[in-house]
Image (cartoon, grey):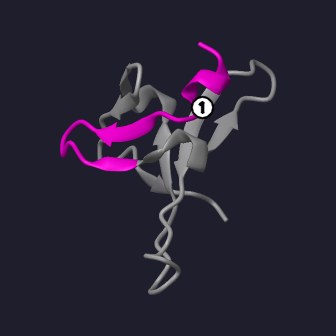
């Protein structure tokens, strides 16, 4: 799969069925030597710029359950989720 094919896909949590974001709005962490994607950094901004900004969410590539035509389904364990380094 090409990186351009991931762009518009929505990220959906398997446990909640909730839309967590869109790949095109996220950053990807890519291993410099192998070129493989290691994780997705999903921004968790404030609502329309108001309120407290929340921590970005790092989604390990191993948490992806299925990549479909319109969405990426993920399953996160509490131990896997972490805040993105600043």
Q: Is residue 66 above or below residue 28?
A: above
Residue found farthest to the left:
16
Residue wearing tag 1: 38
Please tell me whether residue 65 belongs to the stretch shown in magenta: no
Tell which of 54 and 26 is nearer to you. 26
Quarter of the figure that contains the N terminus: top right
Q: How many marks?
A: 1
Residue 72 picture quarter? top left
Q: What residue do we see at 21% from left, 42% from top?
A: 17
* Residue 64 horizontal/vertical position (percent): 40, 28
Residue found farthest to the top:
1
Span shown in magenta: 1-20
Q: Provide the secondary structure element on which disc 1 rests.
A: strand
* Residue 12 horizontal/vertical position (percent): 32, 39
Please tell me whether residue 10 belongs to the stretch shown in magenta: yes
Residue 66 picture quarter? top left
**Residue 19, visible in the rendered structure:** yes
Q: What residue do we see at 58% from left, 49% from top?
A: 25
Quarter of the figure that contains the C terminus: bottom right
Q: Is residue 66 above or below residue 54?
A: above
Q: What residue do we see at 47% from left, 75% from top?
A: 46
* Residue 75 horizontal/vertical position (percent): 30, 35
Tell which of 23 and 77 is nearer to you. 23
Residue 69 picture quarter? top left
């Amino acid at each position: 799969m090409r990186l351009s094919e991931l762009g518009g896909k929505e990220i959906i949590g398997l446990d909640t069925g909730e839309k967590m974001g869109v790949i095109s709005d996220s950053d990807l962490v890519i291993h410099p030597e192998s070129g493989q994607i290691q994780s997705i950094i999903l921004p968790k901004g404030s609502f329309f710029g108001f309120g407290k900004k929340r921590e970005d969410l790092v989604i390990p590539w191993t948490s992806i359950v299925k990549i479909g035509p319109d969405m990426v389904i993920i399953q996160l364990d509490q131990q896997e989720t972490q805040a993105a380094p600043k």
